[in-house]
Image: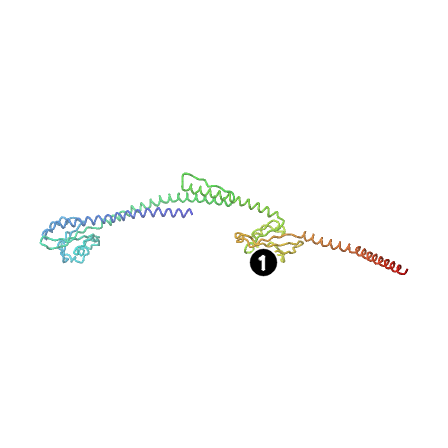
Amino acid sequence: MKKNIFIKSFAIALLSVLIVSLSGIGVTYFSNKSLVSERLITETELAAALLDSTEDFSALDIFRYQDECRITVISMSGDVLYDSDIHEQLENHLDREEVAAAITGTPKTVERYSETFSCKMTYYAVKTMFSDGSEAILRLAVRSAEIDNYIISTIPFLCIALIISAIVAGVFAKKLSESVADRITDISKSLKSVNDGNYIPLKTDMKDSEFFAVYDEINALNSKTVSHIRSEENERERLNTVLDNISQGIIALSKDKKIVFINGSALSLFGSNSSVVSKELVYLIDDQNLLNKITNAPSDTNSRFECAFKDKTLLVETIMPQGQLLRDEISSIIILSDITPEKDLARQKEEFFANASHELKTPLTAMLGLTELALAKSKEDRRMRFNGCDCK
């Protein structure tokens, strides 16, 4: 990150210097061109004012000894009537852009390379009328090389400026990247300390108001987060303590049938440890019969069944979680109750009543026989007494 900040800061600084330098050169170049055009237009109009007839061409000789300026008088047919620098016969100039513009009444400055002078020239031509009513084209030209030379002369200074700017930008970019990287590292350490449980607040500095505000907000947020985490941990610890002290085993399964929670009673029941969390039930329950019954239990409704496990009898209840939040994370809750004592008590009661019934049955049978015998004898005596009375 520090390297990226350095490269970007350095590139931005260097690019800014380059843009400013090129902009300055461009402004100067176009400004000079504008000044040349204005000068050319003004001098052409002044030269046109000197001409009243074709006999006044000698008044233009003042331009003859000026190397940077050339004046030409051209007839409306394109023939050169006068040129301040060339004395021999010149070719027809009717096809020249500035001449054609002057003839149409829309004069303009034109820049092009001159074969005669072997350099770029800027031309401007206007149409002028002599006293006899005849017309001609007056054209003035100046060298453009001065502008190009200026551009070329600025290149060494531009290179020096870029080198100096690169050095300065590199130094400041390095300091900036280190400063920003250190601050981000401090933020990262503080956030990591929140996750590790040994929160270290950021040291704020009023010298940098922007970072102070950010640090202050991060510290406030981290403090709230730490307080919330500790509160949740305490609540979870209390809940786990309660659940671990419940005699019933409790297992919570996710939607993909993996263990997301298991209390101490369930771990003790199956002789396992907390490493089974996030694993499937097969890593916890080694009894295939019990595992199959739990796995095949209905997934859309509550169910309960009894199952033998080793020397115990378990009552297994599968419960659907209530609430959408729990239902999104937990598919079912399994509650395992050891009902072996209840089963033994029920069996003992059954055996007691069976034995008691058996033991009481024998004397009752004898008593019933004697009672029946006594009743029978009593009936015989009454009958005999009754018969005896009848004989008398």
Q: How many numbered marks does the figure carry?
A: 1
Q: Which residue is mark 1?
A: 298
Considering every residue shown, the one lying at the far top of the view is 206
Which of the colour schemes (rainbow, by chain, secondary structure, one colour) is used? rainbow
Q: Is residue 319 left or right of residue 181?
A: right
- Give me the residue at 58% from left, 58% from top: 298
The answer to which of 143 and 297 lies nearer the viewer is: 297
- x, y percent for residue 31: 24, 48
Q: Amino acid at mark 1?
A: Pro
In the image, 376 versus 301, the foreground residue is 376
- Which residue is located at x 57 percent, y 57 percent? 301
Picture coordinates of residue 246, whole percent (x, y): 62, 48
For the residue carrying disc 1, how many other residues have a C-alpha within 10 Å: few (<14), some (14-19), or many (20+)? some
Q: Which element type, helix, strand or loop, lies under badge 1?
A: loop
Q: Position of residue 47 (x, y in %)?
A: 14, 49
**Does residue 355 appear left or right of residue 319 in this picture?**
right
Does residue 96 appear left or right of residue 5 in this picture? Answer: left
Q: Split into 4 quadrants, where in the image is the C terminus? A: bottom right
129 or 83, which lies in front? 129
Judged left or right of residue 351, residue 241 is left
Residue 18, given in percent of the width and then of the height, sits at 32, 48
